[in-house]
Amino acid sequence: TMRQAFGNDIVAKALQKRLEDSKYDIAIIDGVRYKEDADLVRSFPQNLLVYITANTEVRFKRISQRTEKVGEKGVSLEQFLKEEEAPTEMPIKSTGQNADIKITNNGTILDLKNSVEEFTKNPLFSQYI
């Protein structure tokens, strides 16, 4: 609703203000979906865009078992696939295609931890620490 009323970059503009006012040297922004969000990340001199994804079956299994949001637990595959086509979900893949690093999170939490540890050894990452 905010994007419709104020433009696709409204969230990025608000986030940019928070980042500019921050006292920290490093910021992690999650939930980057839209081109405008990725453009914000890229506007900083030192930036790294990481895309973490999982295949459809894994995402469906996880979302149907959690209760993070109302209506997630017990959601049908049909409803899940319909929600995957929502305007908020559509830009994710194209934004992810422009990421510097991609992590596929189809395994266990330990597998994800290992992937993140491996990522931190990547020269792209090490230039920021």
Image: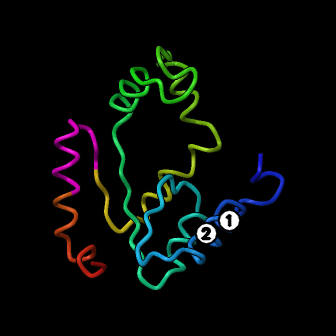
Labelled pair 2, 1 in contact (Cβ < 8 Å): yes
Say which residue label 2 marks: 18
- Give the quadrant of residue 97: bottom left
Along the line of sight, which residue is nearer the eye, 44 or 81? 44
Q: Residue at x 48, y 61 (%)?
A: 29
Could you say which quadrant of the image residue 99 lies in?
bottom left
Q: Find out whether residue 78 is within the magenta segment.
A: no
Q: Please name the predominant secondary structure of the magenta segment in the image.
A: helix
Query: Which residue in the protein does label 1 denote?
Result: 14
Indicate the secondary structure of the residue bearing disc 1.
helix
Query: Is residue 112 inside the magenta stretch?
Result: yes
Pair 2/1: label in front: 2
Horizontal placement of 81 versus 13: left or right?
left
Q: Is residue 33 left or right of residue 127?
A: right
In-image side of 3 versus 116 (left or right): right
Please report the bounds of the magenta region as a residue range.
104-116
How many angstroms separate mark 2 from mark 1 (CA)?
A: 7 Å
Q: Is residue 45 above or below residue 96?
A: below
Q: In what element is the residue under mark 2?
A: helix
Mark drawn on residue 69: none
Dot 1 alpha-carbon crowd within 10 angstroms: few under 14, some 14 to 19, many 20 or more:
few
**Residue that appears at 43% across and 27% down:** 63
Inspect the image, locate mark 2, and give the three-letter code of the amino acid beneath it: Arg
Left or right, 77 with reference to 124: right
Vertical placement of residue 60 versus 87, above or below: above
Across and down, in percent, residue 56 comes to 39, 33
Residue at horizontal 23 percent and vertical 46 percent from the top: 112
